[in-house]
Image (cartoon, coloured by chain):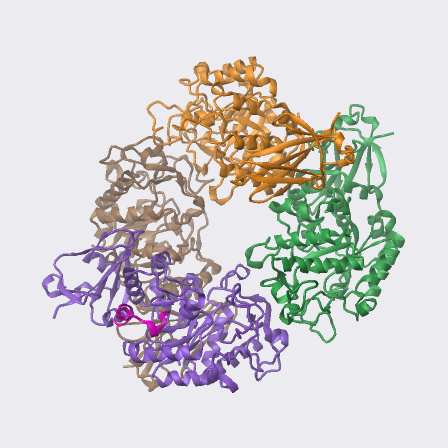
Chain colours: A brown, B orange, C green, D purple
Amino acid sequence: MNKNDFAPTPPMGWNSYDYYDTTVNEEQVKANADYMAKHLKKFGWEYIVVDIQWYAHHAGSRRDQFQYIPFSELEMDEYSRLQPDPVRFPSSAGGSGFGPLAAYIHSLGLKFGIHIMRGIPRAAAHAHSEILDTDVTADEVADPSSICGWNPDMYGVRDTAGGQAYYDSILRLYASWGVDFIKCDDICNTNPYKGNPYSARREIEMLSTAIDRSGRPIVLSLSPGPALIDKAWHYETHANMWRVTDDFWDDWKLLKDMFHRCELWQSHVSKGCYPDLDMLPLGHLGKGFGQERQTNFTCPEQRTMMTLWCLFGSPLMLGAELTQLDEWTLSLLTNKEVLALATCRPWQIRRDDTRAVWTAADEADGSFYAALFNLSDENREISVSMNELYSSPYVHGPNLNLNNKNNIGLRDLWKGETTALTDSEISRTLKPHDCVIYKIASAQ
Amino acid sequence: MNKNDFAPTPPMGWNSYDYYDTTVNEEQVKANADYMAKHLKKFGWEYIVVDIQWYAHHAGSRRDQFQYIPFSELEMDEYSRLQPDPVRFPSSAGGSGFGPLAAYIHSLGLKFGIHIMRGIPRAAAHAHSEILDTDVTADEVADPSSICGWNPDMYGVRDTAGGQAYYDSILRLYASWGVDFIKCDDICNTNPYKGNPYSARREIEMLSTAIDRSGRPIVLSLSPGPALIDKAWHYETHANMWRVTDDFWDDWKLLKDMFHRCELWQSHVSKGCYPDLDMLPLGHLGKGFGQERQTNFTCPEQRTMMTLWCLFGSPLMLGAELTQLDEWTLSLLTNKEVLALATCRPWQIRRDDTRAVWTAADEADGSFYAALFNLSDENREISVSMNELYSSPYVHGPNLNLNNKNNIGLRDLWKGETTALTDSEISRTLKPHDCVIYKIASAQ
Amino acid sequence: MNKNDFAPTPPMGWNSYDYYDTTVNEEQVKANADYMAKHLKKFGWEYIVVDIQWYAHHAGSRRDQFQYIPFSELEMDEYSRLQPDPVRFPSSAGGSGFGPLAAYIHSLGLKFGIHIMRGIPRAAAHAHSEILDTDVTADEVADPSSICGWNPDMYGVRDTAGGQAYYDSILRLYASWGVDFIKCDDICNTNPYKGNPYSARREIEMLSTAIDRSGRPIVLSLSPGPALIDKAWHYETHANMWRVTDDFWDDWKLLKDMFHRCELWQSHVSKGCYPDLDMLPLGHLGKGFGQERQTNFTCPEQRTMMTLWCLFGSPLMLGAELTQLDEWTLSLLTNKEVLALATCRPWQIRRDDTRAVWTAADEADGSFYAALFNLSDENREISVSMNELYSSPYVHGPNLNLNNKNNIGLRDLWKGETTALTDSEISRTLKPHDCVIYKIASAQ
Amino acid sequence: MNKNDFAPTPPMGWNSYDYYDTTVNEEQVKANADYMAKHLKKFGWEYIVVDIQWYAHHAGSRRDQFQYIPFSELEMDEYSRLQPDPVRFPSSAGGSGFGPLAAYIHSLGLKFGIHIMRGIPRAAAHAHSEILDTDVTADEVADPSSICGWNPDMYGVRDTAGGQAYYDSILRLYASWGVDFIKCDDICNTNPYKGNPYSARREIEMLSTAIDRSGRPIVLSLSPGPALIDKAWHYETHANMWRVTDDFWDDWKLLKDMFHRCELWQSHVSKGCYPDLDMLPLGHLGKGFGQERQTNFTCPEQRTMMTLWCLFGSPLMLGAELTQLDEWTLSLLTNKEVLALATCRPWQIRRDDTRAVWTAADEADGSFYAALFNLSDENREISVSMNELYSSPYVHGPNLNLNNKNNIGLRDLWKGETTALTDSEISRTLKPHDCVIYKIASAQ
């Protein structure tokens, strides 16, 4: 069982965070799963992920002051393992955990994921709770000097046999529930902890080992970013996806910065190994944060985002509340030709403060792509020559008979229109923050 | 009440750490106090300080693995305030805390000090314990992301009214016990916490305010070092002493480095404000660490240390077990002429890798000093000219009639011998790591 | 001869830079000297300093593009030593250098200073020019990897006998001219050179040695800032003044930042050793930069600047064109009571983003001062209690009979009015960026 | 003309530096070329590169003190362009430059390369020399604040039209000589210049543009390292090879560190884009440095180096004096099966302080490799399972019928022996610093 086989293409799904923050409940998760099964599954969308603090009791808490309430009450079993809050997830009552919810989602033909924090609950350490199948207790496994800078729930786990046993014990539990995907937080970049952003290196390895031992193919996603480019090999060896930026939201400045991130990570996309551009803040967002809104991105910005994520080969995780999706947003998520980019080989041709040009190669059939992005705040003509596209080591012009330009089709993937290639250069005037992507292939 | 009046000269005393680590008990503290009262008090030694974790229960603990046991049981009152471990400090039983021990020490004409960690016990935060005279609880006062990098007992305190109330409540307790001196740890330099070594700036201020409100003149000592030279004014404004290095032990490399520290901090010694060179690891040391030994310092190194500490005006805190002091060590601690240096004005003349030369001025009578240090590992002649000594802005040669050299006495403070100044230069061949200090004054 | 005696109080004078940039000529220097002799000398002003590039030929140059023209022609003698441009300084013709100009300034009872760049001219190194009284040539003395980041004229000098000989040779020349003051640039902080801002440490020492060998008491001023606080002792040992900030101009943001600098350096002011707050950009400024103007500072800001510079004990160097001084500016420069602050002992009481409070002690007579600064942009009441003033280790309240407040005079130094102290607190409402300074003394 | 086509496989050749330092002459270059043509050319070796300071006159210089003599005399044409020293390169006399030498090397069927320093000669700037086909002079093109930290010859070139014109003018000259390869120094990482190791970013682009404009396919190699991993895309876009470490020599510590470098850069090897592990210090080395010697590497270390360089796909540049090559060294350089690794796709399986395991995939035929390295100082058994080899995204086990192990050949490339694969794991005991590499393919 090779972890790269768990996700042969970039995972596509929905995550509860952008709309619900820490407040999502079972009914809401099911409603989104139902929508996905009905409208999105056939385009490849399949993961339903419950994000942070599903184990936290919110009643009587200080949610008005804190996103994550310090020293709050957590649902935990006798072996120091967090359990779903039974108030929000009624089917978990009686020790069945996320088993029933996972079964429901599987019944729809979808996959089920959960968020976890690196480490072991602080409450377990202070209570000296047991660790399953060991004679050590949580206080012996927890490292009191290893904490998350923004979430107060956990202590890091020591690099000992007891530490590995704890990770094994939670993965065994998750596998028994039927979990298919784990988004582990405070592990990819643990800044500002002791000034060493990669201090959790060993915990990544322990988690990877625990997944292997669980016997279940569970996709491993690491957060938060920015991931460290000089640790790329380690991420690639132990995880399926890792965040390359800090939290991404519907703000053009953050989207523009992604072009820099894609430049940095473009050589590190391969089967089972995906630099992660983070969730897509589309549609309806922000209710759990008290900021319910339609995405702040304009239509051109949304198109730019989808194009870049697909071109680059990023995982695609929807932040939108699915039950409120409008037609426009739906059209962005269901363009098969754009989604097909995910398995092509990307290459940045040029980038400056005002524009970016990328290509991608379909190594199967020799076709390739040209994507033009206007990063500036005014209308702008963006061009690329065929010769520049060939500068990608993965684009092999000769596969197409480029001398006979009339035989070469230029297909605008968002418009769905094909024209003949008439020049050795492709050029187009784009609105601010907008883009165009062409497929270049033999015109049959 | 001005904090500078609490310590008009550098504090001198004994601290339990170097010999006992975290294990000291009441009987041992009393024995050292008895010795001080009898043999050292008349030379100015007066503080008896109980160092770290007097509140920790050691029975059944993991002391074999850890210096500070993670998640161990702590003695605490109902208001989140730590109390002495009644097993080690029997007189504290029944809620009297350190009151009886302080009274005993005061009865000897000495002063009583304790060590504390910055913050509020983690156990109190997780138990949601009360804070005296407030309606907030410890979980609301504790900052779960502010921890010490090496000790697992506390959380930092939030910069709120509740946070100040907690500091007020512990200082009120300490004042009621009769505490005269507080060594607060994890506060002077909080590295590696979030990469900001001065993150506890506000807690220093809260502590200073709490002392002021306690109505008792309590000397405030901040640890650990290295203190930050660019925060000198803040230390000077809020504390009486602050550590300028990391922990100092009986190792020549550390002692040699102190010459660099003294160069750095020499302009920052004034009444009530003392850069602290840390405890004197003399005599018998290390029992609590399982490394019981006579100090590793040679006699010349010990002389060098005492000379530098006194010349610079550092506080003097003995690490030795006093009841085992030998004659040689005692002679180092009871040389009145050397101890008198503490109130003079020091100035480094020269320093390189092999030697250091200092002067100091007695601004009261116009006399001054020349100290020559051999920092190298071989015999070496060290010299200084009278003109160099006058380069100190505080040395005023004309106060002495230097033209008539025969009238000028040159007194070797360690030998206790006076000779006439016969040259415009003072020179002496010194053994490795050794020093000599002369007082230059009118020979009456 | 002790360098601290060269400047027993902070130097006061005029510098050509703020008005003339690199363009000043002999006639202009003389006109400013004449004015100083007539109007300012009696208040202690005495230095006339010719700033940067007096050796550069400007004819046919690229002054429109560059402040310092790269690879421009420099006036140089046969021994690699720069000489005044004879076009701008006619009296220097025939090899007499600055001798005649210095003689003129001395004849007015004033002192003469020049600016130099650290190092040896690049042109000399590339021409393999001679070094006086040695058999080495400039290429052997110059370090081709040691350059200034902003001025293209020089190479740093190697730490060799030949390097010292070069510094000796220029100081011998300057002494022969009658130079009293040298402002050496690119030496105090050599950032960004190789990321080591103190890379010129040895050149500071060579310069100091060369001054000593010259036999003339020449004040040594080091630029640019910010000086490094952890090198304070080295500056104090080798120089008379050193810049504690980057270039200072008539901009409130820079002035406000000086309060931080003064907090940092306040313990490092002593006889012959002056942290330097830089020139006073008052009066008429900027002609050489093509930005001729009256200072941008408001009257309150100018008062605040003069008060802080005097209180702190900074050198005072006028940037204004003296021949155009107005009455208001003149009144700022000739307040004897304010100027007298320079020899008192300063201490910051408090500082935050909106206000600063300082005291200073006259150790001679026991009187002391209270300075209140409004750093905010609105009217603000600022207070200080007598107890706070006593927190300075240098203020000794008991010298005044403070119980009988009526006997204590409170003198507003800028208004020149004295009232009785009627309360244990001094308070005043100040306009934005304004200040008040009181002297507190027995009212005879 | 696409720069990736200039070097479709990693360049292989000889460089004069490791044996001759700055002293190489025409006769020596020719002798090495002759040897290569006769003995190595048929194995793919083809470049002959003249390294640093071929333009420097060494007569009467200070070569005993300096590797690169400061302010020495350089051979330069009237347009600020460096020319070969005619003493060392007699055929260059009369303005023919390297043309005759290049012609000779071409006549042997080989290619000719030269080393250059980033920038324009300092001597040209100080002499205000002309730039070809422009009306600007060298002083206007040179940036006086941009220098190399270790070589005194050049100033960096300004980012202006004149700057580009200068680079164009030198490339036109090199193209006219017949240069096929340029190793540009002080450009890949310009540390310690101003603390910005990528300050020459624009000069890389200007050089790349100048090559394009020259019309000749000239391979561009950038030095020194370490190249910056976060600038990988920029190197890939503008250069053919870039050094990933500082200078590499025959020292095991440096060789061991290369495993870390290869981990870091493994995803960045593609056609025309080669992270460069630096020259191979084999055979006879060091004469020009006064340290003539046989390489310090043991035989196992040499095998490890060749295996890693080939496996990783690094350029191969011989440092050895070719005319003195022994049989053993020659055998390392002429193993066709090992050299064939250069076009396979590498992937690190595991690395710790004692061992490294790599695989590589031949994407053409589905065969793949297993390389085991013993990085420790004692004999050690190193293993890898077939499953681990499949964890490379580029190894596709199913291409081979792995269930029938007898059909799978395991070929030891250095021994030239093939055995059947008998287990699901490959294991071998290796001597310190030794390695083994197997090819795994269908046994026909």
Asked if residue C193 shows in the view, the reply is yes
Say if the magenta span includes residue C19: no
Image quadrant in which the C terminus of chain D is located: bottom left
Of A179 and D64, nearer the camera is D64
| Quarter residue A55 falls in | top left
- Residue farthest along the right direction in this orientation: C38
**In-image side of B383 versus D361 (left or right):** right
Q: Position of residue C305 (x, y in %)?
A: 75, 48
Report if residue D323 lies within the magenta region. yes
Asked whether C130 or B225 is in front, the reply is C130
Closest to the observer: B369 or D184?
A: B369
- Which segment is the magenta one? D317-334
Picture quadrant where residue D393 is located: bottom left
> Residue visible at 25% across and 48% down?
A211
| D336 lies above or below D406 | below
| Number of marks in picture | 0
Q: Quadrant of the N terminus of chain D?
A: bottom left
- Where is residue B342 drawn, in percent x and y? 64, 29
Residue ID at (76%, 30%): B407
D376, A302: nearer the viewer: D376
Q: Give x and y (percent) for residue D330.
A: 28, 71
| Residue A372 seen in render | no
Residue A414, x across and y down, in percent: 37, 71
Name the image quarter holding residue A270: bottom left
- Quick check: D151 left or right of D352? right
